[in-house]
Image: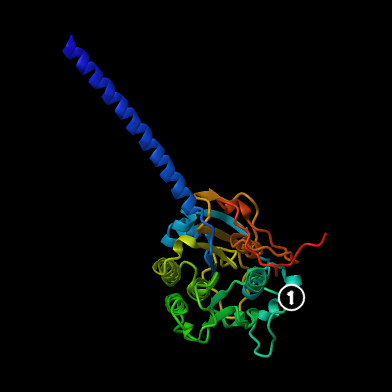
Amino acid sequence: MGAFRGTYWQQMMCNATRRILIVAGMAWFSLAGAMASTASAAQADHIVLVVLEGIKSSTIQSGATPTLTKFAREGAVTWSAQSITPPLAVSAMASLLTGLPVDKHRVTAEWETYDFARSFMRSPTVFDYMDLAGGMDTGVFLMDERFYQLVRPEIYVDSQVCGYTKPQCTPETVAAYIQDFLQKVTSEGGYGFRLFGVPNLLLVHFPTAARIGQKYGWDSPKYSAAVTSIDNAIDQIMKNYEEIGVLDRTMFIVTGLHSGPLNPLIKKVKKGEAVALDPTVPLIAWGANVKKHHTISQQVTLLDAGATMMYALGLETHTEWDSHAVKEIFQTIPERRSTDNALQEIY
């Protein structure tokens, strides 16, 4: 009987100890989960805006672009965002940068032809508002010389352009430029760049898929290779941000100016031939403070990219924009960082 009583109490103590350990373990895992959730919801200090041309949502959904597919699967996405109509490349980029429709920024179809004598676009861009509202800087990497006139030279914007006049300029080349840029601006001296740190916004433009598709066909092996090279370049940029230690505070936003020909049966486009372009483009957000596995429910246009980036960085301005932040993609409301220079609403 005594032996039984001893065994009984030993079992009771073991069970009690086990319960305490289980409860403590559950509490620890809950705390760890909360900490992980808080870490993933950290406010973005940096944004990488990737602007595509000629890549349809279906191409990304098919898995042909592992990096972009990963962003869409793990982050927030809509496959039916709308560019301007018609989605001419220069006009669409102007709308993305200004948050304005064509009739307000006035970058019309004639800007599709580069004119050295033409002045810079007059409408203020998201780069200007970022500097005004928070003293934030921008790095711009363009693969189209026509876009040069959309980016005015300013002390808070560092831009590099390569494109039609430089056949050696490829997505891989641009990724290498960005790697060199990030290494130099994060080292002492800046090596001649205007910025002296990782820019708050880095814009990179990839039109290669559209160019190859128009020349060789949208179902050609060369088009597939171009899409792969773009995805590889985006992956390299992501790794660059990881190497310099800021990926956990970086948000990637991916969208497009157009998705290629509206008619999917078009094989290739003859030089000088006008082809209707598809204005339906993806919009993908991934990284710091972005909801996981989220399908965007609201209607989104290309014009909304600027306000979304401003909101992500905690910046506010009251402007004439026809741009609205896609607030549903965020895990937490970004902390306001606007300076006293931000335009104040008049009551």
> What kind of colouring is applied to the model shown?
rainbow
Residue 53 seen by the camera: no
- Amino acid identity at mark 1: Arg
Residue at (59%, 78%) from the top-left corner?
157
The C terminus is located in which quarter? bottom right
Residue at (68%, 63%) from the top-left corner?
316
Q: Is residue 167 above or below residue 302?
A: below
Residue 84 seen by the camera: yes
Q: Is residue 208 toward the left or the right of residue 300 in the image?
A: left
In this view, the residue in front, 277 or 97, is 97
Q: Is residue 49 toward the left or the right of residue 21 in the image?
A: right
In this view, the residue in front, 75 or 38, is 38
- Disc 1 marks which residue? 106
Which image quadrant for residue 327? bottom right
Residue found farthest to the right:
347
Residue found farthest to the top:
1
x then y, percent, for residue 118: 69, 87
Q: How many marks?
A: 1
x then y, percent, for residue 176: 42, 77
x then y, percent, for residue 106: 74, 75
Q: Residues within 10 Å of mark 1 (few under 14, many from 20)?
A: some
Residue at (49%, 56%) from the top-left corner?
72
Per the image, label 1 sits on a secondary structure element best described as loop
In this view, the residue in front, 134 or 325, is 134
The N terminus is located in which quarter? top left
Residue at (55%, 80%) from the top-left corner?
159
x then y, percent, for residue 150: 64, 79
